[in-house]
Image (cartoon, rainbow, N blue to C red):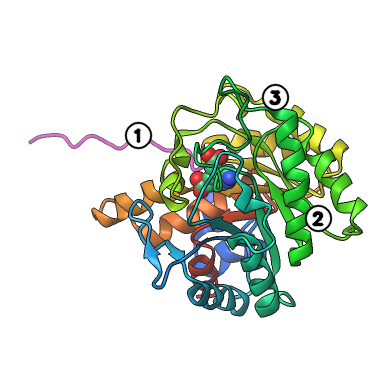
Amino acid sequence: MTEHPVPAPVVPPLVRPRRLRTTPALRRMVAEQQVQARQLVLPVFIREGLTEPRPVSSMPGVVQHTRDSLLAAVSEAAELGLGGVMLFGVPEHKDATGSGALDPSGVLNLAITDVVAEVGDQLTVMSDLCLDEFTDHGHCGVLTADGRVDNDQTLAAYADMARAQAHAGVDMVGPSGMMDGQVRVIRDALDAFEHTDVGILAYSAKYASAFFGPFREAVDSSLVGDRRTYQQDPANAREGVREALLDVQEGADMVMVKPALPYLDVVRRVREAVDVPVAAYNVSGEYAQLEAAAERGWIDREAAILETLTSIHRAGADVILTYWASEAARLLTR
Ligand code: PBG
């Protein structure tokens, strides 16, 4: 007769963290945080001269809007209770100095006025304040004769752009060009023209990132080369904190870290270093990689979207810019 081994005695655990995970109601009760629709901002693209919305192929579900489709998208965002929208303009004609950005009847400035008229009482209307959508070389500033991005000449253009956007009625401008001193120059220009209530959401810690790839298609950018002389080196986290602190000193009302997922440590460090609200931008490449995996059936799309936004929020972002904003607002109320 074979002898059955006697099971070894097990000392039952005294502490059982699993107990708090037993039922959905209990899990919901003890959840440490939950991102809400009011904290989400939808970035939108408006393209001059379109008669039909044009899909951005590297960002499935995202389009370049016509005037009408833009107003439909922002109305939906308002109904869903989002925090705001971030507007990007794509002009039909680009030039070396990005003059379309300063033109009061340029695509972005007109869109600001339209969107404010439509949803200005329900959403915070924000606009990208940068030249890259408007320049034929695709850089965020004006170039010197030998092809470098000229910081201080660019600042002068940003001041004019801020004035045009404020005049069009925007609530907050989002300087994203990473020129030194940009927040201060923009604050001064806004105040000088009696737009003291227009806020600044500074893209403070913005990295020279491969995750901006699909955005280039979304704004018809023809950038040759890279942005490493003004956007930050992905290796540098302390420098991200330094940039955020400088922007607060210069008058930023909110600061942003961008991209979000590869820089959650920077989000956390900036959150701990400043007292203003911190935003994070879940950028085009973060969107594209998840959508591509979902398209192949390799990932649970909706669960991954919510987990993504939860992670960014958990890292310390008060506000999240995401192309999933409207969809996420719907998922969150389910
Ligand atoms: C600059 C700007 C960029 C993005 C937002 N503002 C592009 C860049 O700096 O290269 C990228 C956003 C995204 O990738 O979703 N105007």
Region of the chain picked out in magenta, as a range: 1-13
**Real-space Cα separation, disc 1 to disc 3, in angstroms:** 55 Å
Label annotation for residue 24? none
The crowding category of the residue bearing disc 2, from other C-alpha atoms within 10 Å (few below 14, some 14 to 19, many at least 20), is many
Ligand 1 shows up in the quarter that is top right
Q: Element at badge 1?
A: loop
Q: Looking at the picture, tell me which residue is in the foreground, 110 or 236.
A: 110
Q: Looking at the picture, tell me which residue is in the foreground, 31 or 47.
A: 47
Question: Which residue, given by chain and number where applicable, does mark 1 sit on?
Answer: 8
Q: Residue at x 76, y 67 (%)?
A: 169
Question: At label 1, which amino acid type do we have?
Answer: Ala
Membership of 278 in magenta stretch: no
97 in relation to 105, above or below: above
Asked whether mark 2 lies closer than 8 Å to ligand 1, one says: no
Q: Position of residue 320 (x, y in %)?
A: 62, 54
Q: Position of residue 179 (x, y in %)?
A: 70, 32
Question: At label 2, which amino acid type do we have?
Answer: Gly
Q: Is residue 3 left or right of residue 11?
A: left
Question: Which residue, given by chain and number where applicable, does mark 3 sit on?
Answer: 239
Of the image marks 1 and 3, the number of the one nearer the N terminus: 1
Of the image marks 2 and 3, the number of the one nearer the N terminus: 2
- The quarter in which the N terminus is drawn is top left
**Real-space Cα separation, disc 1 to disc 2, in angstroms:** 67 Å
Report the mark closest to the observer, 1 or 2: 2
Q: Residue at x 61, y 40 (%)?
A: 97
Membership of 9 in magenta stretch: yes
Q: Position of residue 31 (x, y in %)?
A: 61, 58
Say if residue 159 shows up in the picture: yes
Q: Element at badge 3?
A: helix
Question: Which residue, given by chain and number where applicable, does mark 2 sit on?
Answer: 199
Report the mark closest to the observer, 2 or 3: 2
Q: Is residue 167 left or right of residue 20?
A: right
